[in-house]
């Protein structure tokens, strides 16, 4: 069975509510319990990350998360259907805090700045947790789908916003395939950081982005034709 299956039976006994969104903001409550809910949510996410730094998600239980967060299991199941949801939301929240989305007015500067933050995050104790998520996804289709939904797509959407902003500013050729360009930006970074586990310092980041944008930058009309005729 996949990682998610072990908790479905327990979850079915808890009233169903919508899990928190990527912004991790708790909706304002109609009573005085709002502050306590926010504190509980933060405690749960922080406790989950602490546990993930010590052992794989497969070895962590909801009971353990609840105990470390100082809450009851029902509090966790009120917002998340399984430990996998908690783990991915905790990881994404931490990453969003450590890897901001730059808006410098220059697409090259934006991606260089973001990739530097990205390199710092993935070499941190929290960032290294992604390796175990990727490994778990190889043998657990359900978790692989959840990884894409709860982590990869939200982060991908941030990159799409940066790309589209550059297209609107006239920096990138709007005829280019956005997802291919993003693959070319992040693929080498992730390969070097996660597969090779090699340094990815600021100098290498700058070189990578500079080389890439020599090919994707929007050129004045007629420049391509002139170059072909030479």
Image (cartoon, rainbow, N blue to C red):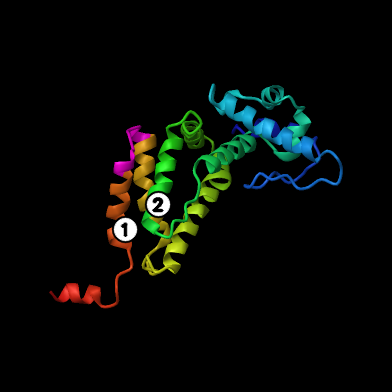
Q: What is the crowding at mark 1: few (fewer than 14 residues within 10 Å), some, or many (at least 20)?
A: some
Between the C-alphas of marks 1 and 2, the distance is 10 Å
Q: What is the crowding at mark 2: few (fewer than 14 residues within 10 Å), some, or many (at least 20)?
A: many
* Contact between labelled residues 2 and 1, with CB atoms less than 8 Å apart: yes
Classify 104 as above or below 97: below
Asked if residue 58 shows in the view, the reply is no
Task: Check disc 2 and report its element: helix, strand or loop.
Answer: helix
Residue at image location 47% in from the left, 56% down from the top: 103
Magenta span contains residue 143: no
Mark linked to residue 111: 2
**Residue toward you, 55 or 213:** 213
Q: Earlier in the sequence, mark 1 or mark 2?
A: 2
* Residue extending furthest toward the left: 230
Residue 110 location, x and y as percent? 42, 53
Residue 168 location, x and y as percent? 45, 68
- Provide the residue span drawn in magenta: 195-204
Residue 63 lies in quadrant = top right
Q: Where does label 1 land, which residue?
A: 213
Residue 78 location, x and y as percent? 76, 38
Residue 118 location, x and y as percent? 43, 41
Magenta span contains residue 202: yes
């Amino acid at each position: 069975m996949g990682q998610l299956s072990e908790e479905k039976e327990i979850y079915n006994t808890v009233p169903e509510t919508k899990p928190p969104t990527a912004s991790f903001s708790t909706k304002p409550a109609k009573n005085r319990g709002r502050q306590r809910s926010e504190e509980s949510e933060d405690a749960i996410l922080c406790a989950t990350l602490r546990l993930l730094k010590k052992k794989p998600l497969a070895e962590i239980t909801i009971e353990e998360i609840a105990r470390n967060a100082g809450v009851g299991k029902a509090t966790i199941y009120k917002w998340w259907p399984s430990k996998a949801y908690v783990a991915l939301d905790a990881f994404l929240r931490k990453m969003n805090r450590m890897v901001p989305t730059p808006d410098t007015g220059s697409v090259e500067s934006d991606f260089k700045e973001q990739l530097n933050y990205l390199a710092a995050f993935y070499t941190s104790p929290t960032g290294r947790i992604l390796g175990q998520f990727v490994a778990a996804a190889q043998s657990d289709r359900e978790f692989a789908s959840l990884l894409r939904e709860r982590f990869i797509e939200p982060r991908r959407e941030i990159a799409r916003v940066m790309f589209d902003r550059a297209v609107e500013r006239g920096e990138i050729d709007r005829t280019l395939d956005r997802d291919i360009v993003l693959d070319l930006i992040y693929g080498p970074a992730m390969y070097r950081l996660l597969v090779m586990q090699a340094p990815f310092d600021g100098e290498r980041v700058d070189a990578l982005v500079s080389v890439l944008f020599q090919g994707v930058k929007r050129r004045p009309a007629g420049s391509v034709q002139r170059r072909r005729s030479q």
